[in-house]
Image (cartoon, helix red, strand yellow):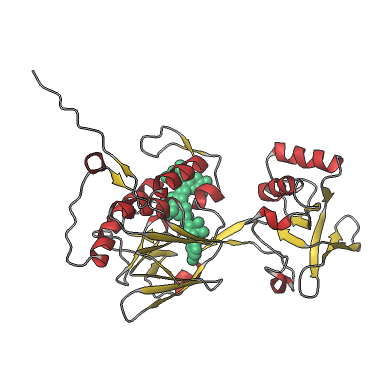
Amino acid sequence: MIKTDILIIGAGPTGLFTVFEAGLLKLKCHLIDALPQAGGQCSEIYPKKPIYDIPAYPEILAGDLTEKLLEQCKQFEPGFTLGERAETIEKQDDGTFVVTTNKGTQHQAPVVAIAGGLGSFEPRKPLIDNISSFEDKGVEYFIKDPEIYRNKRVVIAGGGDSALDWSIFLSDIASEVTLIHRRNEFRGALDSVDKVQELKNSGKINLITPAEVINVIGHTKVEGVVVHQSKNINEESILECDHFVPLFGLSPKLGPIANWGLEIEKNAIVVNNALDYQTNIPGIFAIGDVNTYPGKLKLILCGFHEATLMCQAAYKIINPGKRYVLKYTTVSGIDGFDGTRKEAPKAVVKKIE
Ligand SMILES: Cc1cc2nc3c(=O)[nH]c(=O)nc-3n(C[C@H](O)[C@H](O)[C@H](O)COP(=O)(O)OP(=O)(O)OC[C@H]3O[C@@H](n4cnc5c(N)ncnc54)[C@H](O)[C@@H]3O)c2cc1C
């Protein structure tokens, strides 16, 4: 059981900034995210796009913003459960909540902050009847740890950036990489398409287009896939492999959170924005893109604001009766959980003559 003060569901920009604001109040956080990396939409959908409305950054790439947020919250030592979806929540007799993921990992906290954005990004799965029986037995929809493909035979399916980039990356790690796409044209970046073509010419990637994987074969794990080549209507062949990785993109879904008894309006969680972004269940907050209230704007800076106010309310739940006096970080400095102290600079007093 992982125990923490604030359990944050969603490691997007809102969730990451919550760790910093909670840390200032000496509250510890643990984050769960269905994706294998932090950053939410910023790292999953548009890491290379510049953002222009982050205060004090005239321009910053979404991927770089994620790096900065991770750097800022690192001193407060957050825990992460990545690549797992928060599935169920149960209130305990002592008033805490236990959240269990789809992989069975359990987390316990007195406060839950749902920073789930558009919802958990679910992989778009190919329409192959038996595919679910091979999940985690050689079929993966995300690449979490490229090392598991070392010296293995990997078949990747898809025509976007993920399929192209991972084929390129794994060509140096796997013993064999085959990229299968149902069209001859790819949707990904042109330089990635050129690179795949180069690797095909040098024999480091097998490229099969236009074609589709129509079946997965194996006993206890993946041993091969059946490939249907669209050019020759009835041509089906078996390709032996250890892993089949369909990378058809991700679609966001509010998912299991929708069944937690929270008040939902148009796929978003209704919160009390006049006070602290608490939901209809005391102790459960919803911040960032996932919530709704009159005048709501789905912007990163709004998520940061909501996280800040929510942490103040969480402090009162976790430390009942204790008064908190807001101190500016410019005055108090920041104490990291590792004992390091970032001193606030000495005040410069300007004498007015
Ligand atoms: C192309 C594009 C451009 C944009 N440009 C801008 C811009 O210029 N300026 C701006 O302010 N905003 C912009 N946005 C919007 C901005 O990205 C969002 O407002 C922001 O990402 C919201 O952050 P969040 O942390 O609330 O949610 P998200 O970034 O969506 O992160 C939520 C995380 O929660 C996880 N999650 C959800 N449910 C679960 C669950 N049950 N279990 C585990 N994990 C779960 C998801 O996997 C996800 O990683 C843009 C969005 C897009 C798509």
The residue positioned farthest toward the bottom in the image shown? 93
The picture places residue 350, in percent across and down from the top left corner, at 15, 24
Quadrant in which residue 216 is drawn: bottom right
Q: Is residue 203 left or right of residue 167?
A: right
In percent of width and height, residue 218 lies at 81, 72
Residue pushed farthest top?
353
Which is more toward the observer, 343 or 158? 343
Camera-side residue of 239 and 189: 239
On screen, residue 3 versus residue 124, left or right, reads: left
Q: Is residue 68 above or below residue 228?
A: above
Image position of 352 with respect to 53: above or below: above
Nearer to us in this view, 291 or 21: 21
x, y percentage for residue 126? Answer: 71, 64
Q: What residue is at 75 percent from the left and 61 percent from the top?
A: 244
Q: Nearer the viewer, residue 33 or 150?
A: 150
Quadrant of the image containing the C terminus = top left
Q: Residue at x 45, y 33 (%)?
A: 59
Q: Which residue is located at x 67 percent, y 46 percent?
A: 161
Residue 211 image-quadrant placement: bottom right
For image coordinates 38% across by 72% down, the residue present is 262
Q: Residue furthest left?
A: 353
Q: Position of residue 286 (x, y in %)?
A: 37, 62
319 over 260 or under it: above or below: above
The quadrant of the image that shows the N terminus is bottom left
